[in-house]
Image (cartoon, helix red, strand yellow):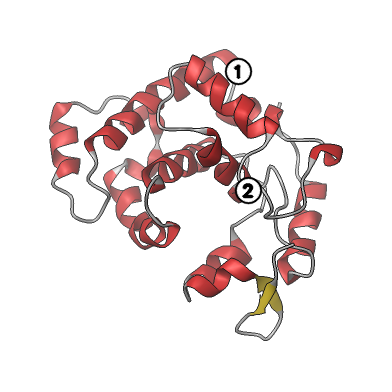
Amino acid sequence: MSKTIKGPDSKPRCEWCGAAPEFFDYHDTEWGFPVSDDYRLFEKLCLESFQSGLSWRTILAKRENFRKAFHNFDFDKIARFTKRDINRLLKDEGIVRHRGKIEAAINNAKRAQELVKLEGSLAAYIWRYEPGKQKLAKPQTVSTSAESLALSKDLKKLGWKFLGPTTVYAFMQAMGLINDHVEGCVIRTKVARARKTFKRPS
């Protein structure tokens, strides 16, 4: 099992927080808490896609720039992006200027619109892949799961891009579909309480 480290308040946190000072706030207030907002879910799918091959620290540092460049990840707006927008984004030093990932975000925005029409919301679709307790591995001991493999495969069938099973698993960790805070981490209990009272979208 992964170890814990002392946070700024001397209470134990997941060990990965020690990689960068800015990780503590992200870990304590966002990572693992359940999310049902379609735009936040879409944002995280996009950011995890942009992270591929890079570090989360790089993406987190650029997150506000990404939000500005991509209209707060309103997929209805992103779906209308044109070649002019792609060229604008390729010149934006505040984000990751990778043509394939930029084009994937635009493509995925269109696919998100299709899912909303089909399922009622992106959240309703995503949360169907929440694993049961009996299927959970020990926290932070795996990088994929049967559910992340299934979700990645199904998204690919629906035309989504740059969302492999490892990327999708990181998304599931961050958006609270699983509580992957290690045992002993002070935030694990808070996330468990949040998940207990969370109303699953349907």
Residue 140 position (above or below residue 86): below
Percent across and percent down for residue 181 are 70, 59
Residue type, mark 1 in image: Glu
The residue closer to the viewer here, 106 or 18, is 18
Percent across and percent down for residue 186 are 74, 71
Percent across and percent down for residue 87 are 13, 36
Residue type, mark 2 in image: Gln
Tell me the tag on residue 173: 2
Ranked by sequence position, the earlier of labels 2 and 1 is: 1
Would you say residue 127 is visible in this rendering?
no
For the residue carrying disc 2, how many other residues have a C-alpha within 10 Å: few (<14), some (14-19), or many (20+)? many
Would you say residue 148 is visible in this rendering?
yes
The residue closer to the viewer here, 144 or 32, is 144
Please indicate whether residue 154 sits to the left or right of residue 70 in the image.
Answer: right
For the residue carrying disc 1, how many other residues have a C-alpha within 10 Å: few (<14), some (14-19), or many (20+)? some
The residue closer to the viewer here, 135 or 117, is 135
- Residues at discs 2 and 1 in contact (Cβ within 8 Å): no
Tell me the tag on residue 170: none
Image quarter of the N terminus: bottom right
Tell me the tag on residue 119: 1
Between the C-alphas of marks 2 and 1, the distance is 23 Å
Please indicate whether residue 148 sits to the left or right of residue 41 in the image.
Answer: right
Image quarter of the C terminus: top right
Q: Residue at x 18, y 34 (%)?
A: 85
Q: Residue furthest right?
A: 134
Q: Secondary structure at mark 1?
A: helix
Q: Secondary structure at mark 2?
A: helix
The residue closer to the viewer here, 33 or 7, is 7
Q: Residue at x 55, y 28 (%)?
A: 152
